[in-house]
Amino acid sequence: MVHAVQNSWLRYWAGAPEITVIDPRSRTRYLSGHIPHAIWVPVSAAFGPDGRLLSDEALAKWLGESGVSNEGTVVVYGDSDGQAAAMLAWILSYLGHPDVAILRTRLEHWRNDGGELAYRPEVANSENFTPRPQPELRANWDDASKQAAPKLLDARSPEEYRGDKVVAEDSPGHIPGAINIPWLSFVGENEELLCQPAEVLARLRKAGANPDQDSVVYCRAAQRSSVAWLAMRLAGSPARLYDGGILDWSQRAGASMDKGSSTTKKSTGVRSSRGPSARKKSVRRASS
């Protein structure tokens, strides 16, 4: 179960043998100042060249080699927008770590609150991490295709959601039935990493989502939507992460996309031009 901790808690417990503090940021940021005893586990290494998450087994191997085990408590912290911290918190939770904590405030506040910073990398011994996947935390294409508004939440920007902005070769628009709650809506103000639980629940209700219902949240891949997932989970809302996101959806043959801001209209019939069936159709047209 993922939960949040405060600076005072981490100052007291950092360095204890049962506590593993993790910095998921880039190496440059890690060496520019990190919380003492924090090991470097860059979340960027969790993704393959295609932009998708590695397999469960590969993720577990990476975590173990980085110095993370299934034992004790892991504490993840972040800065700025919180994407790296939220993504790693989801990975650890999904793979079954029993006690995942997120530092409630950003690293900047740790420093401003009197917390010390270290500048030399922490040497971590290789550990054994056994994956125990938690299916209730993850959604796939089939899950997303069966979700009906307002249970499917698109955490991308309004421009991407409407189809006005297209990234790379993605199909424009959003998954039919999804409502748009941009991930930045869940980022905290001032020194907080995320919004307070009461704010999260209020924003979900305002957008038309029932925070008591199981929801599937997605973005293009996973990092932005992981911020929404973490904020919702900390607020007690049973969210699942569709980590494949639009990157996966766009490559499914015949996957429909809606455009515009309406969440009640039927599918426009815009379908992905990618995937095996779509390629065969293109070949038939070319040969006719």
Image: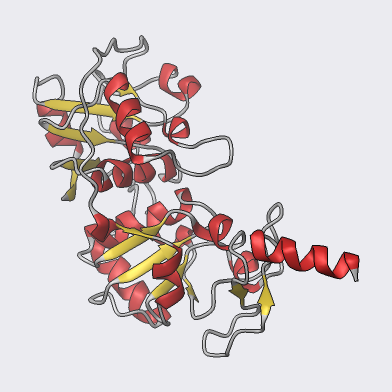
| Residue 273 can be seen in this image | no
In the picture, measured across the screen, residue 87 lies left or right of residue 74, that is: right
- Above-or-below relation of 136 to 164: above
- Above-or-below relation of 269 to 225: below
Residue 77: name its quadrant: top left
Residue 206: name its quadrant: bottom left
Q: What number of labels is visible?
A: 0
Residue 138: name its quadrant: bottom left
In the picture, measured across the screen, residue 268 lies left or right of residue 207, that is: right
In the picture, measured across the screen, residue 218 lies left or right of residue 167, that is: left
- Above-or-below relation of 224 to 37: below
Q: Residue at x 40, y 77 (%)?
A: 147
- Above-or-below relation of 7 to 126: below
- Residue 278, given in percent of the width and then of the height, sits at 70, 65
- In terms of depth relative to the viewer, which is nearer, 36 or 261? 261
- In terms of depth relative to the viewer, which is nearer, 71 or 31? 71
- In terms of depth relative to the viewer, which is nearer, 34 or 142? 142
Q: Residue placed farthest to the bottom in the image?
A: 265
Q: Residue at x 39, y 53 (%)?
A: 227
| Residue 154 can be seen in this image | yes
- Residue 175, given in percent of the width and then of the height, sits at 54, 72
Image colouring: secondary structure
Which corner quadrant holds the C terminus? bottom right
Q: Residue at x 46, y 48 (%)?
A: 223
- Residue 136, given in percent of the width and then of the height, sits at 24, 60
- Residue 119, given in percent of the width and then of the height, sits at 37, 12
Q: Residue at x 13, y 42 (%)?
A: 98
